Amino acid sequence: MACATPVITSAQATKALLLEPGQDLLVADEPKQFAQHILDLLADPQRQRRIGENGRSYVTREHNWTETAVKLKQIYQTAIEKHQAQSTLTAV
């Protein structure tokens, strides 16, 4: 996805992701569905490009190292503050 390549995957593989099937990627759970999606993409280069670019946008938006670092810093800061608050209560 990060390379703007259209992706075809199973429904199970997308459960934890904030993706829009048919827009960001294609979903198929049966071999015939996978094959049909491949044939459809090969016949429609504009759709290939659109789904590939949408997938890349998703990766850029949702899996950005800067954003991930900010979120991780917030998690650590919250944990430190909770630990300090508990330590203060225990010391009293």
Image: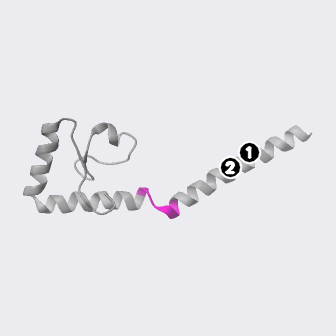
Q: Report helix, strand or loop for mark 1.
A: helix
Instruction: Inspect the image, locate mark 1, and give the three-letter code of the amino acid beneath it.
Output: Lys
Relative placement, left or right, of 60 versus 45 is: right
Q: Which image quarter is the C terminus in? A: top right
Name the residue that disc number 2 marks: 78
Give the percent coordinates (x, y) of residue 22: 22, 48
Residue extending furthest toward the left: 43
User: Residue 47 vs residue 21: left or right?
Assistant: left
In the image shown, does 5 or 76 lie closer to the viewer?
Answer: 5
Where residue 91 appears, x then y in whole percent? Answer: 90, 41
- Please tell me which residue is depicted at 25% across the width and 50% down the height of the picture: 25
**Which residue has dot 1 on it?**
82
Helix, strand or loop: magenta stretch: helix
Going by the numbered disc 2, the residue's amino acid type is Thr
Q: Magenta segment range?
A: 62-67
Magenta span has 65?
yes
Residue 58 at what x, y percent from top left? 35, 57
When the figure is inspected, residue 23 is found, relative to residue 33, above or below; the finding is below
Q: Nearer the viewer, residue 57 or 1?
A: 1
Residue 77 as seen in the image, left or right of residue 43: right
Which type of secondary structure does the marked residue at label 2 adopt?
helix
Give the quadrant of the N terminus: bottom left
How far apart are the alpha carbons under marks 2 and 1?
A: 6 Å
- Which residue shows up at 87% across the image and 38% down it? 90
Which residue is painted at 62% across and 57% down in the image? 73
